[in-house]
Image (cartoon, rainbow, N blue to C red):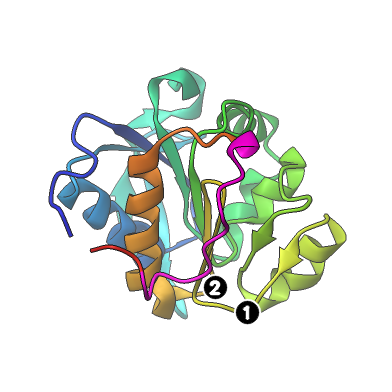
Amino acid sequence: MASQYLKGQRVAILTTDGFEQSELIEPRKALEAAGAKVDVISPQGGSVKGWNHTDWGQSVDVDMTLADANADDYAALMLPGGVMNPDKLRIDEEAVQFVQSFVDARKPIAAICHGPQILIETGMVKGRQMTSWPSLKTDLINAGANWVDQEVVTDQGLVTSRKPDDIPAFNKKMIEEFAEGVHDPSAGRDRSQSAVNSHP
């Protein structure tokens, strides 16, 4: 993988307490390795605490509070999973509006596991091919998504994966889509379902 795919780009990671630890830390490492400047953004300042499979894990410093963050400053958005994290964010109007700004600007978004929950609130999942943690399947289908059981799914700049085991494929596709930048749906770009045949 080219080490500077994302040089000069700023990427936002939106999260709060209860994110799945590996689903924030590993994608952040991959983004930084690709040259991106990554900001962890949260409704709260200080730090947010991760969840490591079955118990509380390590904390991550918050780079900017949601109140101070401007979506216009970022080229792309990454949404980690965890059961508690997206459930809290989806009822936070400021968080939903932050995500909505990326949707409206057609900027690339990557969401893993339970991360797509907040995307339902924006209405953007309708007609999109997606995957997620299995418990979100019905929610996404009811919101109009075409849910498929694959390690990574992309649809016009939206990247989704199911679980921590999918992180390597998720990271690879996320970097590719973020490097492509704004996606124009009128361009009719083919949907890509797997990272297996992607360029390195």
Residue farthest right in this picture = 142
- Left or right: residue 16 compared with residue 32: right
- Left or right: residue 83 compared with residue 23: right
Residue 16 appears anywhere in the view: no
Question: Looking at the picture, which amino acid does disc 2 mark?
Answer: Arg
| Crowding at mark 2 (Cα within 10 Å: few <14, some 14-19, many 20+) | many
Percent x, y of residue 194: 47, 71
Question: Which residue is the site of mark 2?
Answer: 162
Q: Is 18 drawn above or below residue 132 in the view shown? A: above
Q: Give the main secondary structure, helix, strand or loop, of the magenta stretch.
A: loop
Determine if the magenta segment contains residue 49.
no
Question: Which residue is the site of mark 1?
Answer: 149
Q: Which residues are magenta?
A: 185-197
Distance, label 2 to label 1, CA atoms, is 8 Å
Percent x, y of residue 96: 66, 35
Label 2–label 1 contact, CB within 8 A: yes
From the image, which quarter does the C terminus lie in? bottom left
Q: Please state which of residues 145 and 118 is positioned toward the viewer in this rendering.
A: 145
